[in-house]
Amino acid sequence: MHNEYEELKVLMRLSSLNSQKAISQDMNISIGKVNYIIKALAKKGFIKIGNFINEEDKTKYRYLLTQEGRTQKIDRMKKFVEIKKAEYEMLERELEAYKARPGDVNL
């Protein structure tokens, strides 16, 4: 099963990496999982998949981000940043609490 974060990572790489193999290597996941995520993104209407008509190798595909895909990419990026900010703030509070405890080694 994949999650929104993996979908976001694939969405972000589709514009710069031109093959599922390159995406799988970059993300350190299997090509099959990348294919599964891409198909799910297409089914949700986030991307369109098309063949390169003028290419000799008809197995090459192009992935086009739809308007809904663009909206989802932006929304998921915002959500990801908010989560990371909250985690950072929580870690800062924990660090300050450790510093305030008497007898502990300063961090």
Image (cartoon, rainbow, N blue to C red):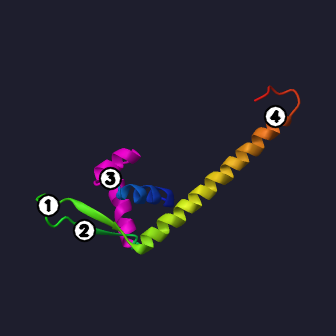
Q: Amino acid at mark 3?
A: Leu
Q: CA distance from mark 2 to mark 1?
A: 12 Å
Find disc 1 in the rendering and name its residue.
55
Find disc 3 in the rendering and name its residue.
17
Where is 75 relative to 105, above or below? below
Where is 91 relative to 80, above or below? above
Find residue 40 and name its label.
none
Q: Are marks 2 and 1 in contact (CB under 8 Å)?
A: no
Q: Amino acid at mark 2?
A: Gly
Quarter of the image with the C terminus in it:
top right
Badge 1: few (under 14), some or many (20 or more) residues near its Cα, within 10 Å? few
Q: Amino acid at mark 1?
A: Glu
**Quadrant of the rendered structure where residue 106 is?**
top right
Majority secondary structure of magenta residues? helix
Label 4 vs 2, first from the N-terminus: 2
| Residue 1 seen anywhere in this rendered image of the structure | no
Find disc 2 in the rendering and name its residue.
50
Q: Secondary structure at mark 3?
A: loop
Label 2 vs 1, first from the N-terminus: 2
Badge 2: few (under 14), some or many (20 or more) residues near its Cα, within 10 Å? few
Find disc 4 in the rendering and name its residue.
99
Q: Residue 34, how many percent across, how many down?
A: 35, 55
Range shown magenta: 17-43
Q: Residue 15, how many percent across, how many down?
A: 35, 58
Foreground of the two, 85 or 98: 85
